[in-house]
Amino acid sequence: MTIFEKAGFYVGILLTLVLLLLIFFSKNGIMEYGNLKKQEAEIAVQAAQTEKENRKIEKEINSLKHDMNYIKHLAKHEHEMAEPDELIFKNASERKDTKP
């Protein structure tokens, strides 16, 4: 091999290495692609959780609009209401307004 062939060979290897480094570590390189794929997966999980929560809320809204038994259940258990013909018995220790 002549000196020009050797120089061309080494320049070719150097250019190949530089191009490989650019492919892996540039702004739009393979490393950035991997990071973006990881972010995409995380966002997909968040979207699935949000969708599940939205379906639950939509179901509750639909029940509040159309299901009288569900409304009565909420009134009794969450708002401590009773129907006119019901009696409610509570222990003194369960009352909120009593002080120990």
Image (spheres, rainbow, N blue to C red):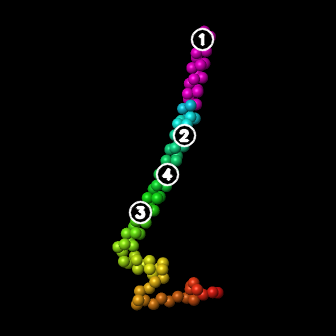
Residue drawn at point x = 40 percent, y = 90 percent: 85
Disc number placed over residue 67 in the picture, else none? none
Q: Is residue 27 magenta?
A: no
Q: Which residue is mark 4?
A: 43
Magenta residues, start to end:
1-21
Residue drawn at point x = 43 percent, y = 66 percent: 57
Mark before the other along the chain sequence, 1 or 3 = 1
Residue drawn at point x = 56 percent, y = 29 percent: 20
Secondary structure mostly seen in magenta is helix
Amino acid found under the numbered disc labelled 4 = Ile
Amino acid found under the numbered disc labelled 1 = Phe
Disc number placed over residue 32 in the picture, else none? 2
- Vertical order, 78 against 30 (above or below): below
* Mark 4 neighbour class, 10 Å CA radius: few under 14, some 14 to 19, many 20 or more: few
**Which secondary structure, mark 2?**
helix
Amino acid found under the numbered disc labelled 3 = Arg
In screen coordinates, is 84 left or right of 27?
left
**CA distance separating discs 4 and 2:** 16 Å
Disc number placed over residue 4 in the picture, else none? 1
Q: Residue 67 occupies which quadrant of the picture? A: bottom left
Residue 40, given in percent of the width and then of the height, sits at 49, 47
**CA distance separating discs 3 and 2:** 34 Å
Q: Residue 75 occupies which quadrant of the picture? A: bottom left
Q: Which residue is mark 3?
A: 55
Mark before the other along the chain sequence, 1 or 4 = 1
